[in-house]
Structures are given as C-alpha cells and as structure tokens.
Amino acid sequence: MYNGPGVEKKWQEKWDSSGLYRTNLQDPKRPKFYNLVMFPYPSGDKLHVGHWYNYGPADSFGRFMRMKGFNVFEPFGFDSFGLPAENYAIKTGVHPVESIAHNCETMRKQIRAIGTMYDWDLEVVTSTPEYYKWTQWIFLQLYKKGLAYRKKAAVNWCPGCQTVLANEQVVDGKCERCKSEVIKKDLLQWFFGIREYAEQLLDYSDMDWPEKTILMQKEWIGKSTGVNINFKMDGSDEVLTAYTTRPDTIYSVTFVVMAPEHPLLMELVNGTEYEKEVREVCDQIQKQTLIERASEGGKNKLGAFLGKYVINPVNGEKIPVYVANFALMYGTGVVMADAHDQRDFEFAQKYTIPLKFVISVDGAKTSPEKAKEAYTADGILFDSGDFTGMNNREALPKVAEWMEKKGFGKRTVNYKLRDWLVSRQRYWGAPIPMIYCAKCGDVPVPEESLPILLPEDVDFIPRGRSPLAYNEKFMKAECPKCGGAAERADETLDTFVDSSWYLLRYPCANMMDKAFEKETVDHWMPVDMYIGGPEHACMHLLYARFIHKVLRDLGYVSTKEPFKRLFHQGLITKNSAKMSKSKGNVVSPDEFVGKYGSDVFRLYLMFMGPFDAGGDWNDKGITGVARFVDRFWRAMSEKTAVVDADAMKRLVHRTIARVTGDIEILHFNTAIAAFMEFVNEVSKTGIDLEHQQMMVKLIAPIAPHLAEELWEVLEGEYSIFHQSYPAYDPALLQETMFDLVVQVNGKVRGKVLVDRGISEEDAIKAGAAIPNVAKFLEGVTVVKQIYVPGKLLSFVVKIA
RNA sequence: GCCGGGGUGGUGAAAUGGUAUACACGAGAGACUUAAAAUCUCUUGCUCGCAAGGGCGUGUGGGUUCGAGUCCCACCCUCGGCACCA
C-alpha cells in the first residue's frame, strides 16, 4: 500500500535541499511562464480548505507547464498590511510587526505541506520596509505625473471610536465595534486619478479573461455617452449644465434637479426665503446612508424647491429647480427631469410638479395625468419640434447634433468610475511620502530619503487622528523645499496600492536599489496565468491594471497589461455558507492531509467538481480518491504481464490526450476521471515499464509526491519534474471499429459494431439488418436516411 | 430592479446539436476471511415485462430540428455582482 504522508515528507525535504524549484530567471533556452496566485493576507487562523483549493490546482497547472517545457516562475508572498492586524493590536496589545511575522511563519509552514513549487527565495511581504519603500516610490511617481492629488471627501466617521471607518466596519449605519451612529465627515484625502485611464482600461484585447469579469469591470467603469445641456438661469446670466444620455426627451423636460453636494447649490439659495428648507433637506440627505438614498420607490424621494427657475433652451419654457436625494455628483450633478424617467416621475408626483410626455408607442399624443408610472419604452416622438414623428432612438443622435449646432449642448462621455481614494487615517500601512509645509504646501519626500519608516512605538488606540499623528518624532520633518519646519503626512496607503504592483516585485524581490528592473520585468511580464477569487474582479484587478499602465507610460515597463490569462477558482462553502472564523464553520485540511496525504487531498479538491465552480464541502468522496491513488500505485509499481499490447498502447495514448486537453483548460475533475478509467481498464490489458513511466509522468502535475516516488521505483532519474510531459500519437487514438448507433424517428433502436471506413451504403445495410431496427422499419415508408460517419444512422419513417 | 452564472440519479457530478447519467460516493448482493477491516466482482434513474424489449425521464410551458440537457421564446427557483449613474 502507498504511504502518502510518509513519502510526501521525504520528497518535500529533497525538493527543498536540491533547490528543485529555484527559478533561473534568465533561462535562454526555455520560454518563460509566470504562474501566479493571488497572495493571501496572513491571518492568524489555520490554513483552510479554501486556501488549498486555490493553491493546489494552481500549482498543478504550473507543474504541467513546467513539464511542457516552460521555465515556470511560481512565487508566493503575503499581503500583510491592513486592518485586521491593527484591530488585533487594539484588542490584544500585540504589535502588528510581531503578529504578522508570526502569522507569516505559521502560514509558510502550512503551505509547505501542500508541496507546491513556490520559489521561496523570491518572496514578497508588503509590510516590510524593503517592499513598502517601493510602494512609496510608486506613489511619488504618480504624484510627479499629476495622478496623485488631495481633495476633500466624505468619509465614515465614528464619533465613539474617534476614527474613520471602512465601509465594511459600518453595519446598519452603526459602528461595528462601539455601535455609535456613524456620520459623514469631510476630510482631505489622497486620490489616484484612475479616471484618466478609464478609456484605456476598457480595452481588453489580447486578454484571456473570463467574459464575466470583463463585463463586471466594464460595468464598474460605466462608460456612457450623452450631452451636456446648458440651462440659463431665469433672471441672471448664470448657467446650470445638466448631463443626459437621453437628449431625445428634451421637449418633455419640466424641471431640473441638483445633487445636494453640488458646489453652486447653496449660492443659489443663500439669503432667500428658501435657504432654511433647502439646508434642512440637505442635512437630512447627508444623514441618509447610501442604502436609504438608494432604496427604490417614490416614498423615498426627498428634495426641496430652490425658488429658482431655468429656461429650457429648446422651447423657452421657465422650469423650476429642485435639490433631490436621488441626484448624485455624477456627470455634472444636475439632471434634467421629465416624465420618461421613473425616478423623475416619482419625484414630480411627490412634489406636484407638472409633467408631459413626448414619446408614445405610435406617436399619438398621450398625457401623464392618468399614468401611474413613467413611459420609459421607446416609441415615436410628438410635440418635439422638427423631430416630431421620428423614432426616438433614431432621433437621439440627431437631437444631440442639433443641440451642439445651436450652441447650448455639447456631446460628452461620462464614466461611473471614481478616482481611487488611497489615503487611510490608520497605522498599519505604508506611510504616504509627503510633507505638509505651512509655507510650500504639499511637498513630496525626495526619493533618496525613502523609505519613510513606519514607527513602531505608536499608540494605535483611535483618538481622533491617525495614530501616526501622535508620534512627535515621526511627524517632525524639514520641508525639502524651503528647509523650514514642517509636518509629515500622517496617513498611510490603501493596501490595494501594495497589491497593485507586487507581481513586478517578485522576480526582483532581492534587489535593494530599485523597485524592479526593467529588463527583468519585461522578460517576465505579463503574468501568463493569474488564479484567484472572483471577489477581486473590480477592485484589485482594475487597480493593478491601472498602475501597470501608469508605469508603462512612465517608461518603467513595456507591456500593456499585467495579466494575460485570468482564472477564478470557485468558492468552497460549508453548508452553503462562506467559511469564516466568526461563523465557526472553517474546515481544516489537517485531519485529511494527516490521514491520506497532500496528494490525495489535492486530488479530491480537484475531483469534487469544476475548478471554477467551487462547491459545498463534504468529505464523503475522499475515500474514492484515496482508493484510486492506491490502485494507481499498485498498477504502476508492480511488474505485470502485458495481455493485449495494442489495446494497452491505445489506452495510454487516449488517456494522455484526454488528460492533456483537460488540464490545459483547468478541467481537473474530468482529467482525474480519465485516470480512474485508465486504472479500471489497465488491469485487463496489462502494462509494460515504458508505458508505466509515461503514465507516471502524466499524473505528476496533479499528484507530485506520488509521481516522484513512483518515478524512483521505476528507476527514473531524479527528478520527474526534469522530465517532459508525455505526448500522444494521434494515430493510436483512432479505433478501427466503432459502434454505429441506429435510430428510427429519433429513437435509438439498435447498435452494430462496424468498420471505421464503412461506406454510407453499407452502413445503411448493416443498420437496417439489426433485428430490432428491422422490426420498426416494417410496414412503414422510409422518408429519409441521415448518416453521420463514425457515429450514427437515423431513419425517418412515415406510417404508410 | 438590472447584469451574469446555475437548476441533470439518493449524493458530488459527466456530456463539439447525435447512445443522457462517464467518473466517484452511498446502497444492495457475492468472493476471500474463523471473523472483521482492507481488497476484488456484480447490480444500482423511474416504470411495465419471466425475457427479448417497451414507455417515461435533464426546473416549468411552448418552439426550431430527422434528432435538444445543449439552440430560440416565455416563466419559476437559486447563487453571485451592481444598485436612484440621469
């Protein structure tokens, strides 16, 4: 019997001591293959099934590419800055430097038990000064290019904890820790100008990504084309500019709404009788959570009349201006409102604003008076000047063009994507390398003084400002411009900044004098395969693309995109709930790995179902995989008599073809099924040493320890991972005979074994001769015969 | 509400428009054994039939086709993502 756990330890040590997985970063002979998994946050919990589900199959794919002849680079690291370590420190007093070092060490040990080919010499830990020095350097590059800037932004503020909260720390509008009511507070924040790259980020050419992910990103970027329309204020020369994607509805516009955050809003009402109410309504809206503001239904519409009117440029009508909660600072922050939009319609009903339709199914005049809802469908325009009688969709571009010619409209492109807020009023992150000078303003730290070290003697208990602000030694700085006394930035960077460039650092992890070297990075970029969870579709994956493009524009890298092929592994749940420590439903692999070994566990995870589907955890089937490993071990390690050499060869080559094809598209479950069928068959045919060796090589990527041990037994030279993957002979895949399926009126009535090269005529003869088929052909007229060579014969008959 | 997956045996699941349920778990029967475990062999969608064989069957209802799990239309359920984006 095969002793998995014992054998595995032996090989893991040998792989380690022989440096098998150390990458030759400049191998001129083999094409490169950068095989990357999303690096984890080093939590204190044990490695769970989800980690294995990500790293095991990803490593199998890397091993497959290695044996296919590629120089595979498969690194690992830790995304170790972030909130959890800081919260843990607040709770227990254990310093993040300490807890993170400890957690990384524990995780490294556990990950080694999987038996992956990570090159630990080139490890990345984002919270080390060697790493975050370069994260700070990247910030400075963006700053120099004008892509990092400061502006006021509303943040979640907990008055109880005296701190900024992340969205996930706000539960039902309350602080998850102290349950205080969370308020919005305007703070100066740092942003990265990702909007400038919105258009470029919509280019997904040459990327082998899941359609779904591309769609999600496109939606997130949210490009729309429309028109900015100028509405002149009644009685003044001021102009309100509204953005619309529906200029075709301009003749139905009966009011205009502004976002409460619009900079001009208070100017319009200051000192008027409307000021008080508008202020009150704005305050109320500010208190609304995003969910309240976003909830559906007319009841939730909230707003106030500003006492001002604008002129509709197309018909000179005087229409009222309102502030409304459903208007956001998107586009221009001003919306032209009409009866062809459900939100506008509901708002108008609540505040009894007149409405009118200009589109109906057939162009007949209709009125909103009796209507219960907006008319949002397409149709024929009426009461629309020169455009009356046209289909509204066809009219739309013409209206836009006409508006531009008339001078009150301008065609505009808009994006939902907002600039990336990168500053955090927190301790455990890379300090922002800026100095705030009373005289010179914001001054970047000179590159030669990086890293700005994160001080260790800091009190992390929140009390108003970022913990760094209370460390006098850290805060004291000299302005690099004027030489005067100044203050350091007390903010740290969002951890997404750390993870947006780590892929460039891996091959350069040991370089001390630069973030990365262009030559090396150009050789290894793009990442050929990136495997990780779909939850990062819009944030991490978009940010990494953005940073990569910025670095390319600055001349630091040459590739357009960081990730060539992307694959999302599915989620492993327990009783259909996400595994988490707080739910207490985390399944640990240890028990199974201890009993069956890493290979069996890895195989079982792969066999459970499609890799991208995930699934609900149960251990019911693991015995089947364990049995298979034993049977495979026996069939490959024992000398057996070959009973049918021809059948054996065909079996081996057919299995190679199936397994290779399946692994290429990461269908590990069916690859394993092919192996199982092989084991079931091979007992009948027998197998010789040459073919045993082929099969052992074939299984090596998905069961590396088992294969290495078998390779030794079969007197192969260490290591099997220096061997190349077996190829199949296409000639051996063709069977000489095949089962011809015979149908009558679409129902299978019989089968007959015939020669592969049989003519249509002979096939029909053979098919019709089957007694059970003949029975169904009796007393009827054959109308049609369909013959699919190598597969099937179908008689279409009519009862005479 | 919108966008995107997915609904197939008792269970995890296979299936370029061409034999639905491969592979595995579980269950049942048998062999080996003093016995058990392990291993091996057979059976295993439902249903009628002694059998040969027939009928039904991939969430529901329609459609296209000689032929549909697969394509089209409508709907139900479910899991993700987004959510007043003008």
Image (cartoon, coloured by chain):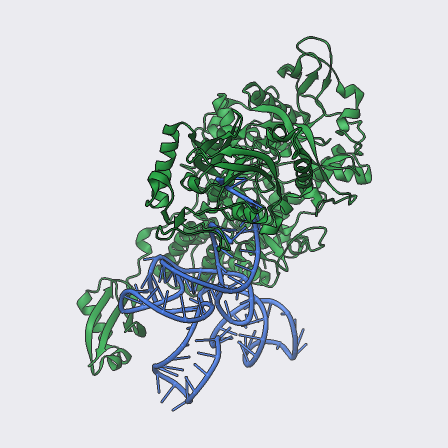
Chain colours: A green, B blue
- Count every numbered label the image shows and give the total: 0
| Left or right, residue A119 beside residue A755 | right
Q: Nearer the viewer, residue A737 or A86?
A: A86
Residue A511 seen in the current view: no
- In the rendered image, which quarter contains the C terminus of chain A? bottom left
Q: Is residue A295 above or below residue A486?
A: below
For the point 22% across and 73% down, which residue is it?
A766
Up the image or down, A598 lies above or below A192; here it is below
Q: Position of residue A637 (x, y in %)?
A: 51, 56
For residue B53, side relative to residue A705 (left or right): left
Furthest toward the left, the residue is A761
User: Is residue A174 among the parts visible in the rendering?
Assistant: yes
Q: Indicate the position of residue A260 as horizontal and vertical percent values.
A: 62, 36
Q: Position of residue B50 (x, y in %)?
A: 42, 89
Which quarter of the rendered picture does the N terminus of chain A lie within?
bottom right
Residue A225 sits in which quadrant?
Answer: top left
Where does residue A520 sit, x and y in percent of width and height? 50, 25
Residue A142 vs residue A590, the one in the foreground: A142
Question: For this view, does A137 lie left or right of residue A634?
Answer: right
Q: Nearer the viewer, residue A271 or A188?
A: A271
Q: Quadrant of residue A165?
A: top right
**Residue occupying the point 19% across, 66% down:** A760
What residue sits 40% from the left and 27% below the top? A407
